[in-house]
Image (tube, rainbow, N blue to C red):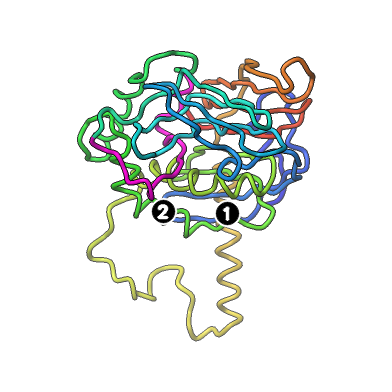
């Protein structure tokens, strides 16, 4: 599965993902990840090592800094921070930060309705909003009001059998040991710059980073939280009567067939899996989308452009250089 035709249909308009290729799918429970390899674009700051949360200036007001000495930082869409001594926040939009620049996001959303969910400083980390919250958060970009996502968070908690409160850490923290299994069972490949994510056989998101270092630093936040939360909810309850040591189930390799038989069974399973993923891609809704330019870098130049994508079937934001896609975070609606 190396042709790019299906991937092109997910991007609106004349935008190009030339040079990117799809790799062999990996699956963990209800979550399937298809690796994307492609050209590395130098000059961009990775989000964990270069982008820093400098302060929370009040509810709904979060300041980030590009701490790198060189390189532009693309703030990941819907990044959030779990932190000590300040309520947890997430951003509704992406942005550019020049080297050494600080930027105050005054339209951030508080994802912790009261102080009861603080974590110890040693547990601080960043996440990406779960898929179920992303379309709403994108709609709320530019809207001031720190509690603007609490009702949606409460509804998400209720669907997961948790208390219906505006506390996202009920999922991020309490279910973190389960969610981190997606990170460990799905393995990013050398040179990987992005991924297609499917939840229970349906398109969930497309993520493209400027280079492998950027994607590697985003991997845990994407696999565990952006898409892992939905996949965790989509998984069927385990069958208490199933025998995990049953080798007579349909499709199990015949041990008497030897190594050649095992290789043949593996190739047949791989071919069937690729055909299944191709079918999922073919069934993914496509069509025209609206692009709205939000920002440029440099501000008065013709270089990078940050645009919001909206369509009936997907939404998100992309960064382009000319017609080439540098960064993309698009998710199913």
Q: Residue at x 38, y 50 (%)?
A: 122
Q: Which residues are magenta?
A: 116-139
Q: In this picture, is 153 found above or below 7? A: above
Q: Nearer the viewer, residue 170 or 9?
A: 170
Q: CA distance from mark 2 to mark 1?
A: 19 Å
Q: Residue at x 50, y 21 (%)?
A: 105
Q: Residue at x 49, y 38 (%)?
A: 204
Q: In this picture, is 26 found above or below 66? A: below
In the picture, the disc for residue 180 is 2
Q: Nearer the viewer, residue 134 or 49?
A: 49
Q: Tell which circle, 2 or 1, labels the residue nearer the N-terminal end.
A: 1
- Around disc 2, counting alpha carbons within 10 Å, would you say few (fewer than 14), some (14 to 19), or many (20 or more)? some
Residue found at the very far left of the displayed protein: 163
Task: Find numbered disc 2 in the image and state the secondary structure of the residue it sits on.
Answer: helix
Res 65 quadrant in image:
top right
Question: Where in the figure is residue 49, as x and y percent of width and height?
Answer: 58, 45
The residue carrying mark 1 is: 25
Left or right: where 196 falls relative to 319: left
Mark 2 touches mark 1? (CB < 8 Å): no
Q: Report the number of numbered marks.
A: 2
135 in magenta:
yes
Task: Find numbered disc 1 in the image and state the secondary structure of the residue it sits on.
Answer: loop
Foreground: disc 2 or disc 1:
2
327 in magenta:
no
Q: Residue at x 61, y 37 (%)?
A: 67
- Can residue 6 be seen here? The reply is no
Question: Where in the figure is residue 262, as x and y percent of width and height?
Answer: 56, 77
Question: Where in the figure is residue 136, as x and y percent of width and height?
Answer: 42, 22
Q: In this picture, is 189 found above or below 57? A: below
- Can residue 175 be seen here? The reply is yes
């Amino acid at each position: 599965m190396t042709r790019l035709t299906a991937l092109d249909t997910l991007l609106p308009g004349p935008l190009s993902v030339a040079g990117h290729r799809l790799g062999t799918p990996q699956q963990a429970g209800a979550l399937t990840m298809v690796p994307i390899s492609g050209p590395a674009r130098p000059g961009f700051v990775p989000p964990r090592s270069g982008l820093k949360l400098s302060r929370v200036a009040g509810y709904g007001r979060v300041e980030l800094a590009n701490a790198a000495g060189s390189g532009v930082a693309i703030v990941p869409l819907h990044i959030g921070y779990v932190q000590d001594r300040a309520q947890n926040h997430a951003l509704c939009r992406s942005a550019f930060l020049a080297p050494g620049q600080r930027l105050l996001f005054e339209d951030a959303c508080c994802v912790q309705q009261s102080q009861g969910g603080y974590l110890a400083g040693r547990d601080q980390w960043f996440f990406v909003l779960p898929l179920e919250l992303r379309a709403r958060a994108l709609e709320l970009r530019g809207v001031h009001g720190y509690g603007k996502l609490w009702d949606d968070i409460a509804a998400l908690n209720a669907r997961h059998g948790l208390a219906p409160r505006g506390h996202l850490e009920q999922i991020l923290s309490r279910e973190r040991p389960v969610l981190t299994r997606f990170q460990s069972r799905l393995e990013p490949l050398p040179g990987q710059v992005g991924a297609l994510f499917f939840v229970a056989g349906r398109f969930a998101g497309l993520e493209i980073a400027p280079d492998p270092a950027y994607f590697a630093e985003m991997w845990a936040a994407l696999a565990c939280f952006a898409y892992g939360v939905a996949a965790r909810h989509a998984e069927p309850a385990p069958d208490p009567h199933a025998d995990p040591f049953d080798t007579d189930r349909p499709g199990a390799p015949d041990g008497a067939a030897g190594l050649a038989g095992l290789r043949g069974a593996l190739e047949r399973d791989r071919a069937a899996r690729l055909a299944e993923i191709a079918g999922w891609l073919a069934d993914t809704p496509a069509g025209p989308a609206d692009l709205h330019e939000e920002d440029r870098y440099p501000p008065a130049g013709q270089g990078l452009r940050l645009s919001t994508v909206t369509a009936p079937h997907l939404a998100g934001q992309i960064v382009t250089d000319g017609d080439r896609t540098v960064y993309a975070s698009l998710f199913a609606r």
